[in-house]
Image (tube, rainbow, N blue to C red):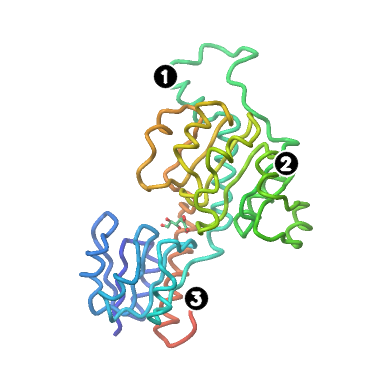
Amino acid sequence: MKKVLVTRRIPEEGIELLRSAAEVTVSELDRDLSGQEIVEMGQGCTVLLTMLSNRIDGELLDAVPTVRMVANYAVGYDNIDLEAARRRSVVVTNTPGVLTETTAELTLALILDAARRVSEGDRLARSGGFTGIHPLFMLGMGLDGKTLGIYGLGRIGRAVARRARAFGMHIIYHNRHANSEADAELDARWVSFDELLSTSDVISINAPLTRHTRGAFDLAAFGRMRPGAVVVNTGRGPIIVEDDLADALERGFIAAAGLDVYQDEPAINPRLLALDNVVLCPHLGSATRECRAAMAVMVAQNVTAFLAGEEPPNRLV
Ligand code: 8YV
């Protein structure tokens, strides 16, 4: 039987499926494996089942020459050097689709929280700060009739837009290209990046991390936004320059932010930790029992298809 290394425990549904087709080793360490540990534990394996936190590059692949497949337990794959995999004829897969609605839910949670100051109010209430309501107490921003600007209108961006429409929001978006199907479905309008920045009341970042998106939200970008704007990021941390976001929040360029992803996870910029007008979530976008189980089955189906000599359903290279 071929060997599979699973670099971190995933839901049992996936492990069971894997065990029907391979000899499976699941790392028992309750933490991310280092590259060196993956190399050591991956010797003799045909498949590495990896997490977003595992950096897979050419050097690592050369050190585990039996590996023919990297099955990522995530939809995003910026942790994998696809070109290096392609050059070595290593197949790479991801888990698209099953986390779309789940991640959109968390995006709305952050939008609502940041706009209506839920977490801030929770902290205040716990620390004895609720001494009675008054007309100017903790005013936030209402969403009804406001404009949501989506940066990256892919599967997740569209699921965010559908939910936001139920809250009475108008949708604009910026992608490299307009998407006429989405325009019709969501009554959405493609705008330039500049227009997205200057006309959105809420900006939701739902793009993958690429050389085009890395660092797109810097001080200049925050400076073009409305002073009352709320920025939410459930895409990838490095799309925002965190120090610039801290500057923008401190200087009142924007009103609030909600983050699920960070530039250097799991570290969180101490300047953001110190601010009350930013909601910080520990990368929970896909963190529901249902979603993580579906991801586990999907990653396992990719592996079992590959081991059976078939085309894995979610092949990237
Ligand atoms: C991961 C994510 O799914 O799938 C992605 O791209 O960003 C995450 O939600 C999660 O880290 C899986 O453990």
Helix, strand or loop for disc 1: loop
Residue 263, image x, y percentages: 42, 47
The quadrant in which residue 168 appears is top right
* Residue 18 to residue 147: above or below: below
**Could you tell me which residue is drawn at 47 percent across and 27 percent down?**
276
Secondary structure under tag 2 reads loop
Front residue (pair 225, 161): 225
In this rendering, position of residue 193 left or right of residue 128: right
Residue shown at the point (47%, 86%) measured from the top left: 310
Using the image, determine if residue 226 lies above or below residue 232. above
Q: Which residue is mark 2?
A: 169
Residue at coordinates 53% horizontally, 26% vertically from top-left? 251
Q: Residue furthest left?
A: 40
Give the position of the N terminus as an image quadrant.
bottom left
On residue 315, the disc is: 3
- In depth, the one of 280 and 35 nearer the eye is 35
- Residue 53 location, quadrant: bottom left
Residue type pointed to by label 3: Arg
Measured Cα–Cα span from mark 2 to mark 3: 36 Å
Percent position (x, y) of residue 155? Answer: 61, 60
- Which is more foreground, mark 2 or mark 1? 2
Q: Quadrant of ligand 1?
A: bottom left
312 in relation to 122, above or below: below
- 27 displayed left or right of 208: left
Give the SS element for disc 3: loop
Q: Which residue is more in the foreground, 233 or 103?
A: 233
User: What's the amino acid at mark 2?
Assistant: Met
> x%, y% of residue 13?
41, 67
